[in-house]
Image (cartoon, rainbow, N blue to C red):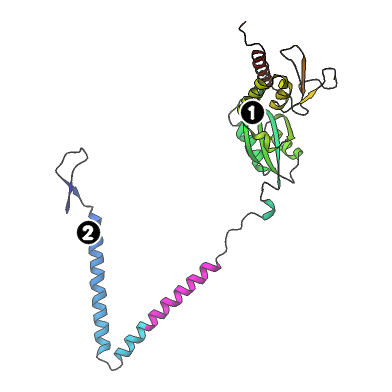
Amino acid sequence: MRFKIRRGGASGRKGPHVRPVPWGSWRREAIELGALFMTAGLAHVFSAELGHRESGSVVLVGLGGVLCIIVVVHMWWAHQREHRRPHAPGPPEGNKTTFRSARLWRVRAQVRETPGQLAALAAAIAATGGNIMSLNSQPDADGTVDELYVQMPTPVMKETLERALTLAGGRAVTVVRATMHELVDPITRTLLLASSVKAEPHRLSAALATMLDADLVSAEDRHHDGRETLSLVSPAGGPIRLHRPGMPFTASETARALAMLEFARLVDDPSPT
């Protein structure tokens, strides 16, 4: 057995450290050396036998030329085979979803508080060729409501997306068209609208409608009722009615609207109570 000397040990102390060399290394070196001797001997015998003949040198040159030709032909054949190798087919051009050939949808679905429910919704969207652009969860009286902005290929209809999410476990699924402007972070949007209300308090109703993506309706209009309509009272005592067809207001959105009203009241009357 041979030994190698290595300076320093694992403990950080200086001094020689003896490490045994594996047995397999010297065996491999011995085999390689023996093969080298055999090759040299065969080459000497071969050249000596042919060297004593008149045509020996010609035969050696001819064998060398044949070997070179074989190598060149093999390299050419390997190069041609690499170019003829079939490539993996890519996705068809018609299945590629680009910004110009896609639509943005705003999706809401009530989900059960069970592990894997959100993953099931995401898998259903991916199966229909969709891409989730934004996601947030809102607590509601009936459970958690997941709101997603989904980019879908143009040929896919909203009914297809609704059916896929319902089969994946979503409840009360609603899908409406959306725009890229709606992808602004809700907190950022709320802060910007609060600043505008502070500067122009009379624009409170419009700020609430923008914050909740709703329409302002008349207080006398009784055609819009239910969870798709939110009735509020301004700091001055006037009614504010918001309506959002196809997208009921959640408890989280109602709390957000009440917080904006409280902020407007403080702006209108900053004196402590």
Q: Residue at 64% of width from left, 54% of height from top?
A: 91
Classify 28 as above or below 260.
Answer: below
Q: Is residue 210 magenta?
A: no
* Image coordinates for residue 255, horizontal then vertical, percent: 66, 18
Of the pair 138 and 231, the residue shown nearer to us: 231
The secondary structure type at the circle numbered 1 is helix
Label 1 Cα crowd, 10 Å radius (few <14 / some 14-19 / many 20+) = some
Q: Residue at 67% of width from left, 21% of height from top?
A: 197
- Three-letter code, disc 2: Trp
Classify 176 as above or below 69.
Answer: above
* Image coordinates for residue 68, horizontal then vertical, percent: 39, 79
* Image coordinates for residue 156, horizontal then vertical, percent: 74, 44
Q: Residue at 77% of width from left, 14% of height from top?
A: 238
Mark 1 highlights which residue?
189
**Image position of 187 (left or right of 24):** right
**Image position of 107 (left or right of 51):** right
* Image coordinates for residue 138, horizontal then vertical, percent: 64, 24
The secondary structure type at the circle numbered 2 is helix
**Residue 165 shows which numbered tag?**
none
Q: Residue furthest front?
A: 199
- Three-letter code, disc 1: Arg
Q: Is residue 252 visible?
A: no
Mark 2 highlights which residue?
26
Q: Residue furthest bottom?
A: 54
Q: Which residues are magenta?
A: 65-86
Q: Is residue 148 visible?
A: yes
* Distance from Cα at disc 1 to Cα at disc 2: 73 Å
Of the pair 235 and 152, the residue shown nearer to us: 235
Secondary structure mostly taken by the magenta-highlighted segment of the chain: helix
Label 2 Cα crowd, 10 Å radius (few <14 / some 14-19 / many 20+) = few
Q: Is residue 72 magenta?
A: yes
| Quarter of the image that includes the N terminus | bottom left
